[in-house]
């Protein structure tokens, strides 16, 4: 390459993996003329567990870009079109989501499908320590507002916002239980006392689902941005969203608001922050504001414990095979029995 010749797309040493800012700028100029005011810079936003999220700026305005993980194989597990569809559908509703600006399913642009949305300011609180400086009163308000936003989500009429056919509500819980049972079978290399009893117990006690709604699938505090007024400014990470049983979202939120009983844990729960509502308080607030019957919530919370046990066991299994990179993976394996215990106890005692 001669001196002064610009590097080919994708070779910018300051560009983050998986996103070529110049290729993105050219595409935006074609599809949304006048949106950008100059060369783009991008950085990867840390914290995502699957799909990659980037903050992109032209020095004046900023946006967010989402794409599948590098080297992804299962396109159905990282469907940018689904994420774009549900966020676009929810934007006119009371559910706070970013405005979507563009969907690109042509992999030749940056190497994968992606979509662009507005940048929404807010804080994703991931741990009790991050909440602690807010104080007890503000922490309580933040977590209660999380429940109120979930009620707003579950009140959305899927047909009215164009989400007919977004999922298959019939048999939703049976399929979920079967799916995570298969996931467990595919990603374990050791004996896990109690895991089969938990799985089978959930199968025997399967509740009757209420009317279906839009389900987020991974609803917790660190997937929601909180603004200066301690209210949600945006619900993020919709990759697991579908139409199904709304109480699965509530059960997961209750699980993430529970005390693991551990001094330290690589799995973040916020329950230790002063003022944090208990799972029972969150469930009661949801029931009061939504009007839904939550008498079977123990099953949904136990299912959340089971699902997280399966996810953590998969991470541990990959760690034993040398397929994980980074700190903290060596301690994931010891957490799995804790989640199994909580699941069995919740299912038994309610």
Image: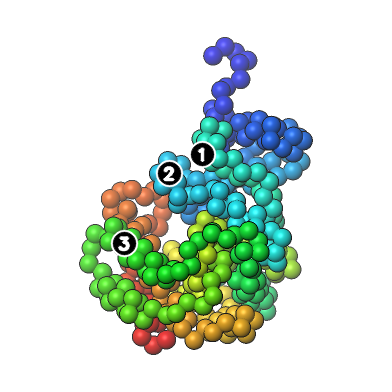
Question: Quick one: label 3 or label 1, which is nearer the N terminus?
Answer: 1
Element at label 3 = helix
Mark positioned earlier in the residue sequence (3 or 2): 2
Residue 72's label in the rendered image is 2
Question: x and y percent of residue 264 in the render?
Answer: 43, 69
Label 3 to label 1: alpha-carbon separation:
28 Å
Q: Is residue 64 above or below residue 139?
A: above
- Residue 125 tag number: none
Q: Are marks 2 and 1 in contact (CB under 8 Å)?
A: yes
The disc, 2 or 1, on the residue closer to the chain's N-terminal end is 2
Estimate how packed mark 3 is, as few (under 14), some (14 to 19) or many (20 or more) residues with alpha carbons within 10 Å: few
Label 1 near label 3: C-beta < 8 Å? no
Residue 307 visible: no
In the displayed structure image, the side of residue 296 where residue 82 appears, left or right: right
Q: Quadrant of residue 121?
A: bottom right
| Pointer 1 local density, CA inside 10 Å: few below 14, some 14–19, many at least 20 | many
Q: State whether residue 105 is above or below residue 11.
A: below
Coordinates of residue 28 in the picture (x, y in percent): 67, 35
Please tell me how crowded label 2 is: few (under 14), some (14-19), or many (20+) other residues with Cα within 10 Å.
few
Q: Which residue is mark 1?
A: 112
Q: Which residue is mark 3?
A: 182
């Amino acid at each position: 390459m001669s001196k002064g010749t610009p590097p080919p797309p994708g070779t910018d040493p300051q560009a983050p993996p998986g996103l070529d800012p110049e290729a993105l700028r050219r595409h935006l100029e074609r599809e949304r003329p006048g949106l950008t005011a100059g060369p783009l810079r991008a950085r990867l936003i840390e914290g995502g567990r699957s799909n990659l999220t980037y903050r992109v700026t032209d020095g004046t305005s900023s946006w967010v870009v989402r794409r599948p993980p590098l080297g992804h194989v299962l396109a159905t597990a990282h469907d940018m079109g689904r994420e774009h569809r549900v966020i676009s559908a929810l934007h006119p509703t009371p559910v706070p989501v970013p405005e979507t600006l563009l969907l690109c399913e042509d992999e030749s642009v940056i190497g994968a499908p992606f979509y662009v949305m507005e940048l929404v300011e807010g804080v994703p609180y991931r741990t009790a320590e991050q909440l602690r400086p807010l104080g007890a009163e503000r922490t309580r308000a933040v977590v209660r507002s999380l429940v109120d936003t979930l009620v707003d989500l579950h009140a959305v009429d899927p047909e009215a916002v164009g989400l007919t056919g977004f999922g298959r509500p019939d048999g939703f819980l049976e399929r979920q239980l079967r799916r995570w049972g298969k996931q467990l079978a595919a990603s374990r290399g050791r004996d896990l006392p109690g895991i089969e009893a938990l799985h089978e117990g959930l199968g025997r006690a399967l509740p009757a689902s209420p009317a279906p709604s839009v389900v987020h699938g991974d609803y917790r505090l660190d997937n929601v941005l909180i603004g200066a007024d301690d209210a949600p400014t945006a619900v993020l990470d919709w990759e697991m969203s579908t139409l199904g049983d709304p109480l699965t979202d509530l059960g997961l939120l209750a699980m993430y608001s529970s005390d693991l009983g551990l001094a330290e844990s690589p799995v973040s729960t916020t329950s230790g922050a002063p003022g944090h509502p208990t799972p029972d308080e969150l469930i009661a607030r949801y029931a009061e504001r939504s009007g839904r019957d939550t008498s079977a919530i123990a099953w949904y919370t136990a299912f959340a414990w089971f699902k997280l046990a399966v996810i953590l066991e998969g991470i541990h299994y990959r760690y034993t095979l040398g397929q994980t990179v980074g700190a903290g993976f060596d301690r994931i394996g010891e957490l799995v029995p804790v989640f199994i215990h909580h699941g069995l106890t919740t299912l038994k005692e309610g």
